[in-house]
Image: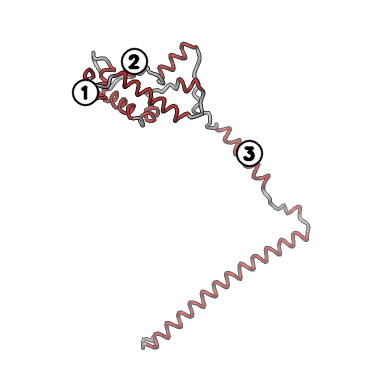
């Protein structure tokens, strides 16, 4: 717990690791830098996607571990999270400080004021289970329509005989190729064996 000291002063001191009153970088400057980092995060995350209201009120939840992991790639947010973790601040203590642009509390204040809800469109481009199954069925149907297969029931006798002859010809050709390879391998092995025996006889190492 922070005690009587103001929470933002404790965070400030921890981030600067100096006395907040003596530091040249004031708390307002830190907040301004944090807001700038949030704007960069919104620009890089949403790009041309998302609604204008959502970009204006992104509602980053500083208690959400995934959000914290995303924002920790920015140096001042990384320092801020380290400070509040070191101080062991409660959620209510953090919420009392984190009220600047882009935060969840700022979005909630806007929703309460306008009576509207800012819809999160982050997952809109992720299809549902039903949509995935429909896409699979459509892809399968397209493959079946495009398949240039042969239906044996639509062939006449002459076409069937030609197909069988072609299949026999290909099978015979493959068999001859395999036989030729085996014959070549056998001939090579025999030639090597003969050369080895000749060498043994020349050097007097022939075996009985």
Q: Is residue 164 left or right of residue 175?
A: right
* Residue 101 drawn above or below residue 166: above
Q: Is residue 115 left or right of residue 64?
A: right
Q: Are marks 1 and 3 in contact (CB under 8 Å)?
A: no
Point out residue 11 in the picture as x, y percentages from the top left corner.
27, 21
Q: CA distance from mark 2 to mark 1?
A: 22 Å
Disc 2 versus disc 1: nearer the observer: 1
Q: Which residue is mark 1?
A: 18
Q: Earlier in the sequence, mark 2 or mark 1?
A: 1
Q: Dot 3, crowdedness within 10 Å: few (<14), some or many (≥20)?
A: few
Q: Quadrant of the N terminus?
A: top left
Q: CA distance from mark 3 to mark 2?
A: 52 Å
Q: Which residue is mark 2?
A: 96
The type of colouring in the image is: secondary structure
Point out residue 50 in the picture as x, y percentages from the top left corner.
51, 26
Q: Are marks 3 and 2 in contact (CB under 8 Å)?
A: no
Between 103 and 2, the residue placed more toward the observer is 103
Q: Is residue 13 left or right of residue 135?
A: left
Q: CA distance from mark 1 to mark 3?
A: 64 Å
Point out residue 90 in the picture as x, y percentages from the top left corner.
31, 19
Between 136 and 32, the residue placed more toward the observer is 32
């Amino acid at each position: 717990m922070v005690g009587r000291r103001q929470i933002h002063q404790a965070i400030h001191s921890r981030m600067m690791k100096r006395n907040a009153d003596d530091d040249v970088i004031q708390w307002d400057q830190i907040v301004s830098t944090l807001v700038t980092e949030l704007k960069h995060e919104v620009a890089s995350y949403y790009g041309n996607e998302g609604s204008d209201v959502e970009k204006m009120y992104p509602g980053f939840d500083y208690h959400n571990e995934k959000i914290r992991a995303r924002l920790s790639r920015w140096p001042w947010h990384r320092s801020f999270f380290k400070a509040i973790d070191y101080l062991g601040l409660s959620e209510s203590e953090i919420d009392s400080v984190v009220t600047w642009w882009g935060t969840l509390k700022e979005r909630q204040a806007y929703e309460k004021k306008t009576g509207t809800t800012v819809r999160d469109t982050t997952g809109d481009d992720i299809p549902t289970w039903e949509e995935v199954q429909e896409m699979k069925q459509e892809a399968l149907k397209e493959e079946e329509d495009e398949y240039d297969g042969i239906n044996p029931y639509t062939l006449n006798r002459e076409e069937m005989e030609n197909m069988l002859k072609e299949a026999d010809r290909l099978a015979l050709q493959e068999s001859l190729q395999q036989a030729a390879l085996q014959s070549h391998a056998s001939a090579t092995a025999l030639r090597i064996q003969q050369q080895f025996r000749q060498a043994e006889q020349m050097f007097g190492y022939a075996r009985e």
